[in-house]
Amino acid sequence: MMRARIDSLKGILFESEIKSLTVGTKSGEITVLPNHRSLITSLRPGAAKVIDMNGDEKYFEVKSGFLEVKNITNGTFLTLLVD
Amino acid sequence: MASLNNLKKRINGVKSINQITAAMELVAATKMRKAQEAALASRFYAFDALEILGNLTDYFSKTGMNSGESFFKRKVEKTLILIITSDKGLVGSFNGSIFKKVDKFLKANAADFKEGKFPFLTVGQKGTDYVKRLGVAPLNHFSNYGDIVDIDEIGELAEILGRGYQNKSWDRIVSFSMNFTSALSQEVVERQILPFEAAQIRKTIEEVIPNTGRYSELKEGITRKRANGTLDYIMEPSPLVILDDLLPHLLKIQVYHLMLEANASEHSSRRMTMKNASDNAKELTNELTLAYNKSRQEMITRELGELTGTVAAMSENV
């Protein structure tokens, strides 16, 4: 199980269970799948691509921000902070 | 005895003032809600950013790595004073009480103030005027942020604050602004914005949620503890780079929250002031109406007296 939440200063942009997340980080583009190791990274401007449980793609604008991946026993939790 | 026409004019005047102040009261109340909502909407972001900071600090203390000092404590030579006020008046004691607090601070540090160790930065026209009255020119002043500040407008202010700190134009930033505790009470608070103290940032964000009244029920949920302090994170590209990226964000969040708090306080202060004005106007209308009716009655009585007097005189003559 993998859940993602995308936060901005204007509120929560997205919160749901997802299949994958692709985002540009300062050390290159990464795709996060369930069971990814816990990670904290800093984001690069671009778009974050989320694939939801129906297989639909959703895009979110990223000017700068951070991604935190928590891999704990009951699932993988992603928090994306975007500006 | 004032003439009837004059009284009538005054009553109408006071009534229309009452209409205006009642409308302003309503408008201010709505704006206050909006500012509160904006502050509340940003709380998830703010707490997550703090959580990341917490994880980073854990990492640094565990590995003993030097976290750099770009935003941390150092010897204080100059202290930047940030004063957040409103652009417009008619807000009761909102600006006055901030100035009182600053006056007190300057009095306590009079020697440092004379040596010019306190550069000023102001937000709001009233604050700028105040600093000029002190005989100092503010380093920079911002105004026209509108009723509720937008996050995109904060960028420049936050950047100036951060840059000045990094190139050592000042070693500490203290802000004076109004804190919104509930719709009925606000208080002036003096806060240290830089150097960072995680506890201080947390407090600023927690204070976004009012103690009583609407939204206060959210206080429970947000003060949750960090649960994942022991996770073994990979930090990419490196903890230092993330920290360098994160700190300006935290500064921005803090400034944003300060401004929103000040906005909410300004509007609620204006609401109270306008409510008092409306109440006074109503009272005045009542008094004037009473006076109007009295003099009207007096006039009628006098006319009646004259009438009966005349009739009596006429019937005697016949």
Image: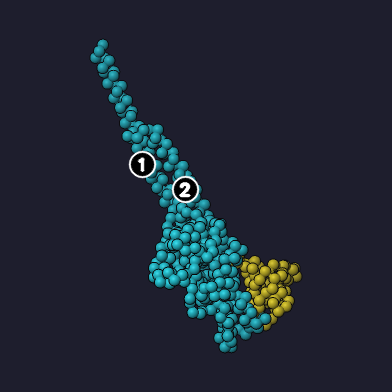
Residue B287, disc? 1
Which quarter of the figure is the C terminus of chain B placed in? top left
> Quick check: B104 left or right of B39?
left
Which quarter of the figure is the N terminus of chain B placed in? top left
- Residue located 54% across and 67% down the image: B255
- Residue located 48% across and 51% down the image: B25
Residue A66, disc? none
SS at mark 1 in the image: helix
Q: Amino acid at mark 2?
A: Thr
Residue B250 percent coordinates (x, y):
57, 72
Mark 1, residues whose alpha carbon is within 10 Å: few (<14), some, or many (≥20)? few
* Chain bearing mark 1: B
Chain coloured yellow in this rendering = A
Q: Is residue B148 visible?
A: no
CA separation, marks 1 and 2?
19 Å
Task: Choose top left, top right, bottom left or bottom right for residue B164.
Answer: bottom right
Q: What hue does chain B carry in this figure?
A: cyan
Residue B240 percent coordinates (x, y):
62, 81
- Residue located 73% across and 78% down the image: A28
* Chain bearing mark 2: B
Q: Amino acid at mark 1?
A: Glu
Q: Which residue is mark 2?
A: B21
Q: Is residue A31 above or below residue B107?
A: below
Disc with the residue nearer the chain's start (1 vs 2): 2
Q: Are marks 1 and 2 in contact (CB under 8 Å)?
A: no
> Quick check: B164 left or right of B98?
right
